[in-house]
Amino acid sequence: MLDQIAALRRQAEEDLAAATDRAALDTFRITYLARKGKIAELFDALRTVPADQKPLFGKHLNALRADIQTLFDQRSAGASDEHRPSPSLDLTLPGRRLFTGSKHPLTQVLDEIKAIFVSMGFGIADGPEIEDDYHNFGALNFAPDHPARDMQDTFFLSKQALLRTHTSPVQIRVMEQHPPPVRVIMPGKVYRNEAISSRSYCLFHQVEGLHVDVGVTFSDLKGTLISFIKQFYGSSLKYKFRPTFFPFTEPSADIYITCFVCGGKGCRLCKQGGWLEILGCGMVDPNVFRSVGYDSEKYTGYAFGMGIERIALLRYGIDDIRLFFENDLRFLNQF
Ligand code: PHE
């Protein structure tokens, strides 16, 4: 009987070593460990041995069963671990690089601008990129013969439909839909039929702003935009307002900041002037209020608009606007 036990142990160990997958391990369990398996058969045979030998054989049989069960359990645990490295995997090799996506630099700049204005109580609105002449020009107080309507600047899709040339038509759409007060920023894509170069592209992004209420003054415009500039560019930066003209605002101004490349001494970026124009703004022209049905005697407001590409070019020291639209990973990976 002891020989039989020893033989079974040897055979079980051999079979177990050969069982590499789940199916083989199952077969092993049924053959050896199940209720009608080979070990159970030997326990049955124990009944026929003389009573005085039973304790000795019983002890060996119990040990056999326990050992084989333990070995089987160990082997099963290994087999169930699917991530166990296979012998062919060389763990000394360097890892494979994971490519993670990142936000486009324009999106990063826009996110920052949005966060600043939202913290100052502005909402966010948007409008269609395909506009009509009325929203893009007429309602914004452009004269019928204004040069911006020229084929040179505007992509016309038909006599009436065009690709918006600025985000200002969204001002009109917001005011048409909401009675005052309004306080929103309106980011989006705009299109201009310009010769493509390192400085201009047929498509770019703007953020428009509009705040209309009773008693809104030029001081509110200044306070809000100066606060924006300080948060976005840093509080030590110098800025200046310079009068300019837009059909839809009166008075109007361009805001300039000290060139942060040369600190105002004059360089290639600021074209030797020491200042960079970053934003157009002004008090909403009463004619614009009339075209959306706002009471221009009761309400006043300010509007502003800025180009995102320009801000991103300046901030990251990028010298070609086309890089933003080429989706070249060698460029985008740097952000
Ligand atoms: N729409 C103007 C532009 O495209 C910018 C602007 C917006 C100016 C709002 C004043 C007020 O240049």
Image (cartoon, rainbow, N blue to C red):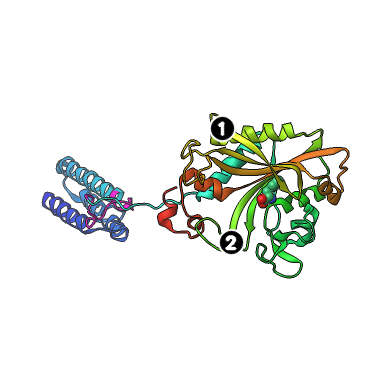
Q: Residue 156's spot in the image, x, y percent?
A: 69, 67
Give the residue at x 23% y 52%: 93
Q: Badge 1, how many Cα within 10 Å: few under 14, some, many 20+?
A: some
- Please tell me how many numbered marks the rendered image carries: 2
Above or below for 79 versus 282? below
Give the residue at x 42% y 49%: 334
Residue range corresponding to the magenta coloring:
78-92
Helix, strand or loop under label 1: loop
Cβ–Cβ below 8 Å for labels 1 and 2? no
| Residue farthest bottom in this picture | 158
The circle on residue 202 is 2
Helix, strand or loop under label 2: loop
Q: Nearer the viewer, residue 191 or 7?
A: 191
Question: In the picture, residue 218 is in which quadrant?
Answer: top right
Residue at numbered disc 1: 238
Q: Residue 37's spot in the image, x, y percent?
A: 27, 56
Above or below for 221 versus 133? above
Please name which of the two marks, 1 or 2, marks the residue nearer to the observer: 1
| Residue farthest top in this picture | 236
In the drawing, does residue 170 fall left or right of residue 239?
A: right
Label 2, ligand 1: CB separation under 8 Å: no
Tell me if I can see residue 103 in this picture: yes
